[in-house]
Image (tube, rainbow, N blue to C red):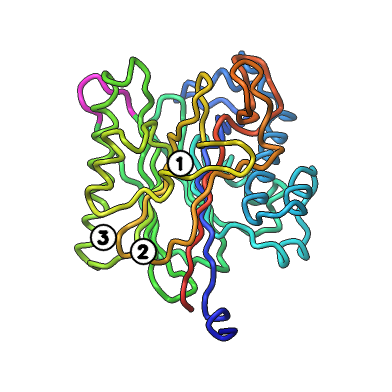
Amino acid sequence: MFLSALLVSLFTFVQFNCENLFDCQHDSLKNDVEFLPDGSYHWTLFRYWRKLNRVGQTIVSCGERNGEVETLAEQDCSISEEAVANWHLPDMVALCEVENDSVMRDLTKRSLLRTARYEYVVTNSPDERGIDVALMYSPFSFRLINSRVVRIAPIRGMSPTRDILYASGLIISGDTLHVIVAHLPSRRGGEQHSRPFRRVVAEKICAIADSVRAVSADAKIIVAGDFNDYTTSESVRMVCASGFTDVSAKAVGQNGARATYKYRGEWRSLDHILVSTSMMSAVRSCRVHDARFLLVEDEKYGGVQPRRNFLGPRWRDGFSDHLPLVAEFALDE
């Protein structure tokens, strides 16, 4: 029994919409003026680095489910080499709402995450605000083989949107893991009006998965991101119908969160982790990570809500308006 335990390794996967992780530099090709020092959000270097470390604190706290790690994650300090060795930091993190490569470089190489030695791949999308998606991974548990960006051709009435990120690499079991990260178009203009835009992206996700399976029928594939849709919505159902299970469908937290996002007092999850049928046997758990320091009291509707970074134009010095999803997989070495 002890030997079998040694032969199984847990692989921790996190999906997190980190809420407008912009730098302070203006990109003349993007509408990012709100997040400049003289913009409506007064996005100064202090606030930027504070936000980077807040994102780092959140990711660190996803690695363990005990009070000690949560307490340490609240502190604004670098992670020591000893801490990295003792904590099981997430092996992979799918991020939504990051502005560019510079932000990801600062997050992985200069923030409190710097000693965790995360590597990353990131898109460079035509999104009007400059929003991208990224995949951050530990080189100790994932060896990147290939990555590519898939652009979405807008249909009539659709604004340029976020690219899809595809990456593949070797995990500790020797298997190849394929990961698809997406941030589907928002519900701006209404759910019914914007639904076809999300359908286009969902169709592209299915096409990517099909191309992977054409080479390896039993490929291990994870699809993760902010769908701006719920488990019962068309886009999520479409991807699930192509051979995936939404393992995050019933994920809840331990401190009052019933999903990753709360809108007008109702908990519902726009964030999803979908797993291919060939990988379902490895799933051990999926939860909403609602560490106490990521929450505040919901004074209007009761209970708790995510401790967001902004409420309108007012800076709240929080973390994000979304909570992370954490999935654990048992991998045979």
Please name the amino acid that badge 2 sits on.
Met
Q: Nearer the viewer, mark 3 or mark 2?
A: 2
**Residue 316 percent across, percent down from the top left:** 69, 23
Dot 1 or dot 3, earlier in sequence? 1
Residue drawn at 70 percent across, 62 percent down: 87
Disc 1 vs disc 2: which is toward the camera? 2
**Secondary element type, mark 2:** helix
Q: Which mark is residue 212?
A: 3
Residue 107 vs 158, above or below: the answer is: below
> Mark 1 sits on what residue?
133
Q: Is residue 152 visible?
A: no
Residue on which the image places disc 2: 279
**Which range of residues does the magenta coloring cover?**
154-160
Secondary structure category for the residue under label 1: strand
Instruction: Work out whether 187 lies above or below 275.
Output: above
Q: Are marks 1 and 3 in contact (CB under 8 Å)?
A: no
Q: Is residue 200 left or right of residue 304?
A: left
Distance Cα–Cα, label 1 vs label 2: 23 Å
Considering the numbered disc 3 on the image, is that residue within a helix, a strand or a loop? helix
Per the image, is 158 magenta?
yes
**Which residue: 71% across, 58% down?**
115
**Tag count in the figure?**
3
Q: Is residue 141 visible?
A: yes
Answer left or right for 204 relative to 40. Answer: left
| CB atoms of marks 1 and 2 within 8 Å | no
In this view of the protein, which residue sits in the foreground, 113 or 63?
63
Nearest the camera: 55 or 280? 280
For badge 1, the amino acid type reads: Val
